[in-house]
Image (spheres, grey):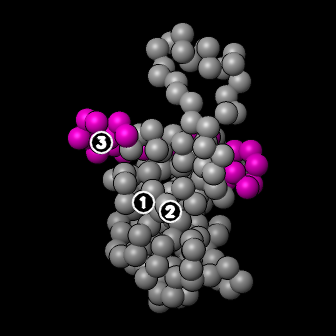
């Protein structure tokens, strides 16, 4: 519903499959994910999703995209949100091993609690590691942290959103 006709024609002329979903209760990201889920079911192949442009523009839409990563977490093996400055993905409760691509990602990173407080977070590989800390809005959230190792481990009791600043963007900050 928000696709300008000239943009649609540009992509259609290059072989892009364009559909229309007029459901007013879903945002553009959810409509795309719904389409990809249908494709995944048709082919039987699990799709890893990289959503470009996820952090640009309006703050309410950015939060909607992060919410989509939470809502669709069990549908796709990986769902990565990316913009020209930031990349991020949801960490479900458990233990995680993250190996940042330092040719692409800067040392700046963060761990943001999503939906509920994360009552136990332990990390390694960060300048300011956490050891059983609680992360929650209105309390501590881990922003502006830094990678100091080639590998980061995160153990979390509840959902967290991991994000890094891209290398070229860090030079501009």
Left or right of 23, for residue 57: right
**Which residue was labeled with disc 3?**
41
Is residue 92 visible from the viewing direction of this image? yes
Most foreground residue, 159 or 41: 41
* Residue 160, above or below 28: below
- Residue 8 is situated, as x and y percent measured from the top left of the image, at 62, 20
Helix, strand, or loop for circle 2? helix
Residue found farthest to the front: 23
* Residue 54, above or below 4: below
* Residue 101, above or below 143: above
**Which residue was labeled with disc 1?**
73
**Which residue was labeled with disc 2?**
70
Residues in magenta, as a range:
38-62
Residue that appears at 74% across and 54% down? 59
Left or right of 45, for residue 166: right
Q: Is residue 42 magenta?
A: yes
Q: CA distance from mark 1 to mark 3?
A: 16 Å
- Residue 132 is situated, as x and y percent measured from the top left of the image, at 47, 89
Helix, strand, or loop for circle 3? helix
């Amino acid at each position: 519903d928000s696709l300008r006709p000239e943009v649609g024609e540009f992509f259609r002329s290059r072989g892009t499959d364009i559909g229309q979903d007029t459901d007013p209760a879903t945002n553009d990201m959810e409509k795309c994910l719904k389409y990809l889920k249908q494709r995944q079911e048709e082919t039987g192949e699990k799709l890893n999703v990289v959503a470009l442009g996820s952090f640009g523009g309006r703050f309410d839409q950015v939060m909607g995209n992060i919410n989509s990563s939470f809502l669709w977490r069990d549908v796709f093996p990986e769902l990565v949100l990316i913009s020209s400055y930031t990349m991020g993905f949801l960490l479900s409760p458990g233990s995680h091993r993250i190996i940042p691509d330092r040719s692409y990602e800067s040392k700046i990173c963060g761990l943001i609690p999503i939906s509920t407080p994360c009552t136990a977070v332990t990390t390694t590989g960060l300048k300011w590691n956490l050891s059983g800390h609680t992360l929650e809005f209105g309390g501590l959230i881990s922003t502006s942290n830094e990678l100091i190792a080639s590998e980061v481990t995160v153990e979390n009791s509840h959902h967290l959103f991991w994000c890094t600043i891209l290398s070229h963007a860090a030079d501009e900050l």
